[in-house]
Image (spheres, helix red, strand yellow):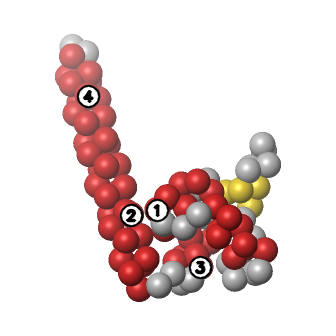
Amino acid sequence: MKTHYVCKIIGVSKSTLLRWEKEKLIPEASKNLAGGRVFDAKDVEAILRQLTPKQKELAKKALENQMRSLVDNMTEEIVILAKLIASIN
């Protein structure tokens, strides 16, 4: 996940996230080819441990909403693919 996406989900500013990284409170993010930070699931779990209980609850809701959105999009794509497959006869 890119930095801005992680910040949006967990509700902290980019400067806070980068400070935590600099202070080694969270793992150092990997870098993509363009040099941007990329956080994997373990990184995000470490970040979540830094949050207050209220921030954790907000992050949980944001993640649940994102998951629902992904499922909805996948469902729509599956329906389209099924229609396309059925149309090939």
The residue wearing badge 4 is: 80
Q: Nearer the viewer, mark 4 or mark 1?
A: 1
Q: Which residue is mark 2?
A: 63
Question: What element does badge 3 sit on?
Answer: helix
The answer to whether any part of residue 78 appears in the image is: no
Measured Cα–Cα span from mark 4 to mark 1: 29 Å
Viewer-closest of 73 and 46: 46
- Lower sequence index among marks 4 and 2: 2
For residue 89, above or below residue 80: above
Rendering quarter of residue 15: bottom right
**Comes first in the chain, label 2 or label 3:** 3
Q: Which marked residue is nearer to the observer: mark 1 or mark 3?
A: 1
Q: Which mark is residue 9?
A: 1
User: Which amino acid does the dot numbered 2 rest on?
Assistant: Leu
The quarter in which the C terminus is drawn is top left
Residue at image position (58%, 76%) is 47
Residue 46 image label: 3
The local crowd at label 2, few if under 14, some if 14 to 19, many if 20 or more residues have their Cα within 10 Å, is some
